[in-house]
Image (tube, rainbow, N blue to C red):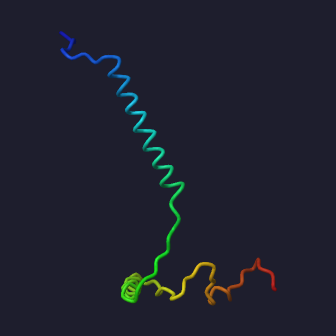
Amino acid sequence: MDTSSDTKIGCLHVVGVILLTVFISVSVTLWVIQYFLFPKPFQPVTLNARETTVLAQKLQQLGLPAPVDDLTPNRIPKSAQAVKFPCQRKS
């Protein structure tokens, strides 16, 4: 039984494949770290009247409440201000 082949794989070919594999692995790892651990800042959007209506209909189909008109950051809805937790002190 003859195990020799007509094409020979040289040492440089093996090293090249190994370096290519390492380069691809490092590139994918760096991309995953950048994409998942350091995402870009969230940019809020403003919906127009038609988009708000469509969103409200979709939320209603899912059984969720309609969106609040004013969702500015650092604003606590009045319904949430009245909630008292046992660990809160009276002010």
Q: Position of residue 81 (x, y in %)?
A: 67, 86
**86 to the left or right of 66:** right
Q: Residue furthest top?
A: 1
Q: Nearest the camera: 22 or 89?
A: 22
Q: Dividing the image into 4 quarters, which one contains the N terminus? A: top left
Q: Position of residue 62 (x, y in %)?
A: 40, 81
Q: Residue at x 48, y 85 (%)?
A: 67
Quarter of image, res 8: top left
Q: Residue at x 40, y 29 (%)?
A: 19
Q: How many marks?
A: 0
**45 to the left or right of 1:** right
Q: Position of residue 50 (x, y in %)?
A: 36, 88
Q: Dividing the image into 4 quarters, which one contains the C terminus? A: bottom right
**40 to the left or right of 49:** right
Q: Position of residue 11 (x, y in %)?
A: 35, 17
Q: Residue at x 21, y 11 (%)?
A: 4
Q: Nearest the camera: 68 or 83?
A: 68
Q: Residue at x 40, y 38 (%)?
A: 24
